[in-house]
């Protein structure tokens, strides 16, 4: 399996962290995806140049972090990141989708502030920041009930929180969210989390 990646992207980190959690390091080749060259191997796998993307040995190309993690989960018997059925499965998927939305908001803010000078919209930037705050507040309400499970939803949440710490320290997501801070602290020393942290992980 070949996983096309890029440093810092929270969605890439999510996929790479799953590789570590599932013990698939020796089966997944992690390579840097060149999304500026439409003739590169990345575009052969993902025609829209989206990362992460993964070329599976059975000829299937996966161009979304949710699909990639689900596929990886099915290839490993070491752990289960996606509960097989019942309410646990839907809770995990719902949590993953919301955390992915938080990452999307962060990426949208970065995209806006990196626009050429004179074309940056402070209103658009603030809109995405406000959405991020709303999602963080929702997770704060829920985090007190979280146990020790580390499924796809929790992986996405960890990646989202670390991305905001790395890119938007000024937002201080920890402030006024003790439940979320406590949950985050429980998993930051996990081997997979340390190995993929945005401040230190490189390709």
Image (cartoon, grey):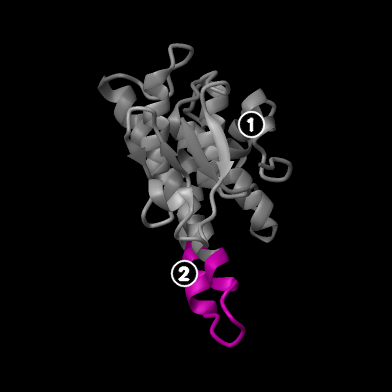
Q: What residue is shown at x 48% (from left), y 42% (from top)?
A: 139
Q: What residue is shown at x 72% (from left), y 45% (from top)?
A: 199
Q: Is residue 100 left or right of residue 185?
A: left
Rendering coords of residue 169 (x, y %): 69, 56
Q: Is residue 129 magenta?
A: yes
Using the numbered discs, state the Cα–Cα distance from disc 2 to disc 1 in whole angstroms.
Answer: 30 Å
Q: In the displayed structure, would residue 87 be above or below residue 97?
A: above
Q: What residue is shown at x 62% (from left), y 84% (from top)?
A: 117
Rendering coords of residue 185 (x, y %): 66, 32
- Indicate the quadrant where residue 142 lies: top left
Sequence-wise first label, 2 or 1: 2
Q: Secondary structure at mark 1?
A: helix
**Of 173 and 65, which appears nearest the observer?**
65
Rendering coords of residue 194 (x, y %): 69, 31
Residue 140 visible to the viewer: no
Q: Is residue 92 left or right of residue 102?
A: left
Q: Secondary structure at mark 2?
A: helix
Query: Would you name the residue on which mark 1 appears?
Result: 193
Identify the main secondary structure in magenta: helix
Q: What residue is shown at x 48% (from left), y 53% (from top)?
A: 40
**Of 38 and 202, which appears nearest the observer?**
38
Residue 60 visible to the viewer: yes
Q: Which residues are magenta?
A: 110-130
**Of 7 and 106, which appears nearest the observer?**
7
Q: Nearer the viewer, mark 2 or mark 1?
A: 1
Check the picture and name the quadrant holding the C terminus: top right
Disc number placed over residue 127 in the picture, else none: 2
Label 1 neighbour load within 10 Å: few <14, some 14-19, many 20+: many
Label 2 neighbour load within 10 Å: few <14, some 14-19, many 20+: some
- Indicate the quadrant where residue 171 lies: bottom right
Q: In the displayed structure, would residue 26 be above or below residue 137?
A: above
Q: Is residue 133 magenta?
A: no
């Amino acid at each position: 399996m070949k996983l096309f990646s890029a440093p810092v992207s929270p969605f890439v980190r999510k996929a790479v962290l799953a590789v570590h959690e599932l013990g698939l390091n020796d089966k997944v080749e992690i390579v840097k995806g060149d999304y500026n060259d439409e003739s590169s191997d990345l575009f052969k796998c993902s025609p829209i140049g989206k990362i992460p993307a993964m070329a599976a040995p059975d000829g299937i190309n996966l161009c979304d972090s949710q699909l990639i993690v689900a596929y990886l989960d099915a290839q490993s018997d070491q752990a289960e990141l996606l509960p097989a059925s019942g309410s646990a499965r839907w809770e995990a998927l719902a949590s993953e989708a919301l955390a992915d939305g938080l990452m999307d908001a962060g990426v949208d803010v970065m995209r806006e502030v990196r626009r050429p000078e004179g074309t940056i919209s402070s209103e658009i930037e603030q809109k995405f920041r406000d959405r991020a705050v709303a999602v963080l507040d929702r997770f704060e309400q829920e985090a007190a009930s979280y146990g020790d499970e580390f499924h796809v939803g929790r992986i996405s949440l960890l990646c989202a929180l670390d991305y905001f710490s790395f890119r938007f320290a000024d937002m201080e997501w920890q402030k006024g969210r003790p439940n979320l801070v406590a949950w985050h602290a429980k998993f930051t020393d996990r081997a997979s989390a340390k190995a993929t942290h945005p401040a230190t992980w490189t390709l």
